[in-house]
């Protein structure tokens, strides 16, 4: 069965960077785009961007341009999301989510989430 | 960007009730809409995609309808495990955008 397992809780200081991993199993990693979505405490869901695991191409929401990087390591079926220049507004749970139809934008499987706290 | 709205923002209902949640898009998204259920501390779970197609394994008491700009999620007979927050999301165009959510609480 499809599984996405994310790395653990992170605590960072303002100005720092964070890198979250998402290890996929149960399917061919390069056959489906991976999205990243975040959720601030008590708030709704916000799409951040996607990565094409086959080519490494990425597409980000405008508000993250310049400080968001997405990469992947196909040898270990793992996607990474790195966010830099952190502020307290970046405190959130970060999810990876597999696209259902390669690139449709509709996700069918989600990771368990990674809590990031940004605090001085 | 396509803006998504939902109503109501919250509702109280009893087990066995029929519940309807509405989602509206700021422009025509044809049927590129997915509904998620989220419970506290858990990741969202896909219920319905393409506006009306039930995701595998989702109980048949959930149904979706609509096209264009107006969509509904209906739970025909609310069960205890259905108390959660429900989100709609459009995938007609990027950036993907979500509705603000509807919290379904126990009356």
Image: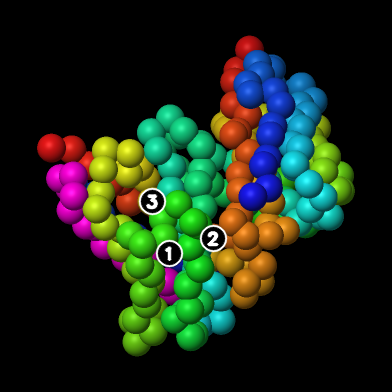
Residue A23 visible in this rendered orientation of the protein: no
Q: Choose the circle earlier in sequence order: 3 or 1.
A: 1
Tag 1 subunit: A
Q: Which residues are magenta?
A: A12-26
- Work out how far the residue at label 3 is from the one at label 1, CA to CA, in angstroms: 13 Å
Residue located 44% across and 81% down the image:
A56
Residue highlighted by disc 1: A4
Circle 3 marks a residue in which chain?
A
Residue B103 in the figure: left or right of residue B76: left
| Residue drawn where x is 51% and y is 43% of the image | A45
**Distance of label 1 from label 2 (alpha carbons):** 7 Å
Question: Is mark 1 in CB contact (under 8 Å) with mark 2?
Answer: yes
Q: Nearer the viewer, residue B95 or B51?
A: B95
Label 3 belongs to which residue? A94
Image coordinates for residue B12, horizontal then vertical, percent: 65, 16
Tell me if residue A23 is in the magenta stretch: yes
| Residue A108 position by quadrant | bottom right
Check the image and report above or below for A3 versus A32.
above
| Picture coordinates of residue A115, whole percent (x, y) | 30, 46
Residue receiving disc 2: A109
Q: Which sits in the foreground, B17 or A54? A: A54
């Amino acid at each position: 069965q499809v599984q996405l397992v994310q790395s653990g809780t992170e605590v960072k200081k303002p100005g720092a960077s964070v890198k979250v991993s998402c290890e996929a199993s149960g399917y061919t990693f390069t056959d489906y785009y991976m999205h990243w979505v975040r959720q601030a405490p008590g708030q709704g869901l916000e799409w951040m961007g996607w990565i094409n695991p086959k080519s490494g191409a990425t597409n980000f929401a405008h508000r993250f341009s310049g400080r968001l990087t997405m990469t992947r390591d196909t040898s270990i079926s793992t996607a990474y999301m790195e966010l830099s220049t952190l502020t307290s507004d970046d405190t959130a749970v970060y999810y990876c989510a597999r696209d259902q139809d390669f690139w449709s934008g509709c996700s069918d499987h989600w990771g368990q989430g990674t809590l990031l706290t940004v605090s001085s | 960007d396509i803006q998504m709205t939902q109503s109501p923002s919250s509702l109280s209902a009893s087990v066995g009730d029929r519940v309807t949640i509405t989602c509206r898009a700021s422009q025509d998204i044809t049927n590129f809409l997915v509904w998620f259920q989220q419970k506290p501390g858990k990741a969202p779970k896909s219920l319905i995609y393409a506006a009306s197609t039930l995701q595998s394994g989702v109980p048949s008491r959930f149904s979706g309808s609509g096209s264009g700009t107006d969509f509904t999620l209906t739970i025909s007979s609310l069960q205890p495990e259905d108390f959660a927050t429900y989100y709609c999301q459009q995938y007609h165009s990027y950036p993907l955008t979500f509705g603000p959510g509807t919290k379904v609480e126990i009356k």
